[in-house]
Amino acid sequence: MNEFIKRGLIYQDNKGNAVFVHKDEHDSVHGADIRGTVTDVRYTGIASGSDASHGFEYIKGTPEKVYIFEAAIDMMSFIELHAEENNAKFVSMGGLKPNSVIGYINSETPVISCVDNDEAGESFNNRWKGNSNFTINRECRNAGVKDFNELLIQRKNLIAMRCNEIHLFCNETEETVREQYSPTYSR
C-alpha cells in the first residue's frame, strides 16, 4: 500500500473516501475510482469527468503481460499475494467495464483475467476467452472465494491459525521436554 501512496495512486479525500487515481505510464491523470469508507453503506463509483478508457493501474517492472481486475482492492490483494510477480501491468476496470482494457485484450500482449468468481465475472471471461492472448486465473474459484480480497483474508486467517497451532505445539513440546529432562532434586 505504501508504494501506491508514494506513487500518488491512492489517497484519502476530505470526506474520508479512498481515491484510486487513474494515471497512465506518463503520469497523466485520467480520472479516479472512489470507495466510501466512512458509512455503513459502502459507496463505490467513478469520479465525474473520468475517462472510461483508463482504469486504476499499477506497473511493476517492464510490463510483458497485463492482469485485469474488477476492483482496485482485488488488484492490491493479488499483488500482495503474488509479490514475486514482476514485469506486469495490473489494471482495475472499476467494475466489469472493458473500455479500460479492450486495447490490451485486442493486442498481442498476454492478458490474465482476475475478475470475480461469480456469474458476472464468468460472463465477462466467456466474452473474451476466444482471444489467443486471454487467459483466466482460477485461483479464487479453486479456493471457493469470490475475489482476491477474500482470498487474501482466507490465507491470512490460515496462516494465523497455523501460527497458533505451531505456538501451542512448541509450548506443549517445551513443557514435555522440561518435565522429561529436568533434573529432579530431592532434599
Image (cartoon, rainbow, N blue to C red):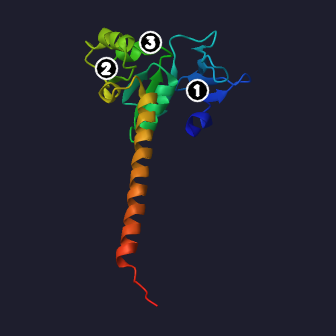
Q: Amino acid at mark 3?
A: Leu
From this view, report whether residue 51 is shown above or below residue 64.
above
- For the residue pair 155 and 125, the one nearer the viewer reads as 155
Residue located at (58% from left, 39% from top): 2
Give the left or right position of residue 137, taking residue 186 as reference. left
Q: Amino acid at mark 2?
A: Glu
Foreground mark, 1 or 3, reads: 3
Q: CA distance from mark 3 to mark 2?
A: 21 Å
Image disc number at residue 27:
1
Helix, strand or loop for disc 2: loop
From this view, report whether residue 40 is shown above or below residue 63.
above
Q: Earlier in the sequence, mark 1 or mark 2?
A: 1
Q: CA distance from mark 1 to mark 3?
A: 24 Å
Q: Position of residue 140 (x, y in %)?
A: 35, 27
Give the left or right position of residue 164, taking residue 4 as reference. left
Residue located at (41% from left, 68% from top): 175
Q: Quadrant of residue 143?
A: top left
Give the left or right position of residue 130, taking residue 156 as reference. left
Q: Is residue 40 visible?
A: yes
Image disc number at residue 96:
3
Image disc number at residue 108:
2
Q: Earlier in the sequence, mark 1 or mark 3?
A: 1
Mark 2 neighbour class, 10 Å CA radius: few under 14, some 14 to 19, many 20 or more: few
Q: Earlier in the sequence, mark 3 or mark 2?
A: 3
- For the residue pair 172 and 83, the one nearer the viewer reads as 172
Image disc number at residue 97:
none
